[in-house]
Structure formats: C-alpha cells, structure tokens
Image: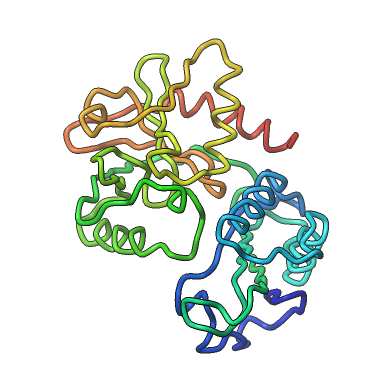
C-alpha cells in the first residue's frame, strides 16, 4: 500500500497522470527517513527541512501540513504494510498539483508516502570493500537550490550509471569550482588525524539530516575537531578515513579511492554515538 493525499492505495494502482509536475519538471521535494517500530528517526529535522524547502520553492504549504498530521499519515502507511513493528524505509514526496507548464496553474500541493522494509533496526557499519571515484562528466552548481532534496537528480542518476559501468561502489560530485561536494547518495566526511572535515552548504552540498546530526555530535566531543570548508580532490589521497552519510544507512566507510586505502576507526566510533542520538531523538 501507498498513501496519496491521505488515501491508501494498492501498490499496483496507477494514480499519477501524464500531467504530473514531478514527472514533467521535477517540481517536487522528498524526504527519506528510517522508521523503527513506528518511531521516525529525526522526524522533526526532516519535517523542518521539508517546510523550509517548500518555502524556497514557493510551494503553497497547506494549513493541514502540521508535523502531527504528516506523521500520522506516515504511521497509517506503515500500519497498512505491517511495518509499524519493524524497521522500515519511508519516503515522503510533495509536489505541486497537476497543470500548467513552467508556471503552475495553481500552487496547491499533494503528498505521497511510500514504505518498504529494512533489514536492520539500527545503524550498522557495513564491512567489505567500498571503492569510489570522482564523477567529472558534469558538475553541480553551488547555489541554495542544490542543497535541497528535490526530485531533480539527473546528476546523481548519470553518476550512478557511470559508477556501475566502471565497477565503482559510489562516486563523488564536484562543483564548478572543482571542490568535492558530496557522494552520489549522501554527504562526505574526510578524516585527517583528529580533524573531521565536510563541505559547507555554500559549496552546494545537500543539507543532509545525518550531516547535521554528526556536526552537532562531533562539536560536543573533545577527541575531534570539526571543520566545514571546501574539500579539494588532492586531500583525499592524504586522508586517514572517508565516510559517506545519509538517513538510511547512517555511515558508510570508504575503503579505497584510486591508490589510497582507508581505515574506519573514527566511523566505527561515531556510528555507536549516532545510534544513541537516534534512539533518544
């Protein structure tokens, strides 16, 4: 089952038309989050990011779109799939209603909730090799729109195809200034000694929820120093660790980039602390 504007529909239902603005223009935003036994990890952060993003895109925010209303619609969807007592991946998409060309016929919005099962109820540090490369065919534009989680993700799609074709597990995206911005599916953190560095939002990286939580977490730890500043490709060769973050996997250590190989000591330390924050949040 999935939830479209508050109504549950079987998975095979065809409800979106050829005039859907998300399909036509990428005129949509989405939040992907982890739910465990009905508890939405970092729900308030996801909700506030969604509201801020809708305002930036000049979408009409319905009066009903309270945090409580949308959470209940997510919970209704989880219950319909017997996922309210299990770990689940939830995607909440909002888009302007059908009609118009670049200029919408109206500014009203619809929402769509989807859910699927996850194997683990908590964040686990994956083992095995994980090799990355730079994706240099196209660059990301460093502006505020790039920090939003919109449905316009062609760069990520083409980069993922490139990675698959060339045997890489992931790729890093660069902006027009040749700074490394993020991975195809999450934010990047670079570890050198006790310094943990990540790209600033001004470079165009996604305003990720786990990025935000780790920045808050690291800032409270005496063992590490956090730095938000531009990341150069040359830094990767000298780093002790690289890891990628998003709301579903938590932290994914990188094991290899070109001739450089990395450990995961800091990532292993942080993932336990992240789980603690998630359970309390």
Residue at (20% x, 29% y) in the render: 234
Residue at (28% x, 43% y) in the render: 131
Left or right of 51: which side holds 214?
left
The colour scheme is rainbow
Q: Quadrant of the C terminus?
A: top right
Left or right of 62: which side holds 265?
left
Q: How many marks?
A: 0
Residue 17, compared with residue 183, is above or below; it is below
Residue extending furthest toward the left:
259
Left or right of 4: which side holds 166?
left
| Residue closer to the observer: 253 or 105 | 105
| Residue closer to the observer: 94 or 195 | 94
Kindly indicate the quadrant of the structure image that contains residue 174. Answer: top left
Residue at (24% x, 37% y) in the render: 257
Q: Position of residue 276 (x, y in %)?
A: 68, 31
Q: Position of residue 102 (x, y in %)?
A: 46, 76
Residue extending furthest toward the top:
222
Kindly indicate the quadrant of the structure image that contains residue 30. Answer: bottom right
Residue 223, compared with residue 102, is above or below; it is above
| Residue closer to the observer: 112 or 34 | 112
Q: Position of residue 96 (x, y in %)?
A: 60, 73
Q: Position of residue 184 (x, y in %)?
A: 37, 51
Residue at (52% x, 87% y) in the render: 19
Q: Quadrant of the N terminus?
A: bottom right
């Amino acid at each position: 089952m999935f939830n479209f504007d508050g109504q549950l529909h079987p998975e095979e239902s065809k409800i979106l038309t050829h005039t859907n603005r998300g399909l036509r223009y990428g005129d949509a935003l989405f939040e992907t989050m982890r739910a465990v036994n009905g508890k939405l990890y970092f729900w308030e952060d996801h909700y506030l990011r969604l509201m801020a993003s809708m305002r930036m895109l000049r979408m009409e925010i319905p009066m009903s779109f309270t945090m409580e209303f949308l959470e209940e619609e997510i919970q209704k969807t989880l219950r319909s799939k017997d996922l309210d007592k299990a770990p689940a991946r939830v995607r909440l998409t909002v888009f302007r209603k059908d009609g118009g060309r670049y200029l919408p016929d109206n500014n009203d919005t619809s929402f769509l909730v989807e859910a699927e099962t996850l194997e683990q109820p908590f964040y686990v540090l994956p083992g095995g090799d994980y090799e990355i490369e730079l994706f240099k065919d196209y660059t990301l534009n460093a502006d505020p729109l790039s920090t939003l989680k919109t449905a316009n993700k062609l760069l990520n799609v083409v980069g993922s195809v490139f990675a698959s074709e060339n045997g890489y597990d992931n790729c890093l995206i660069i902006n027009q200034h040749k700074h490394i911005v993020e991975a195809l599916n999450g934010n990047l953190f670079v570890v050198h000694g006790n310094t943990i560095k990540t790209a600033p939002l001004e470079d165009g990286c996604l305003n990720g929820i786990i990025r935000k939580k780790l920045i808050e977490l690291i800032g409270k730890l005496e063992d590490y120093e956090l730095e938000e500043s531009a990341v150069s490709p040359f830094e990767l060769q000298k780093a002790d660790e690289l890891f990628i973050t998003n709301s579903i996997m938590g932290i994914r250590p990188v094991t290899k980039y070109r001739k450089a190989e990395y450990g995961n000591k800091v990532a292993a330390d942080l993932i336990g602390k992240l789980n603690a924050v998630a359970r309390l949040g």
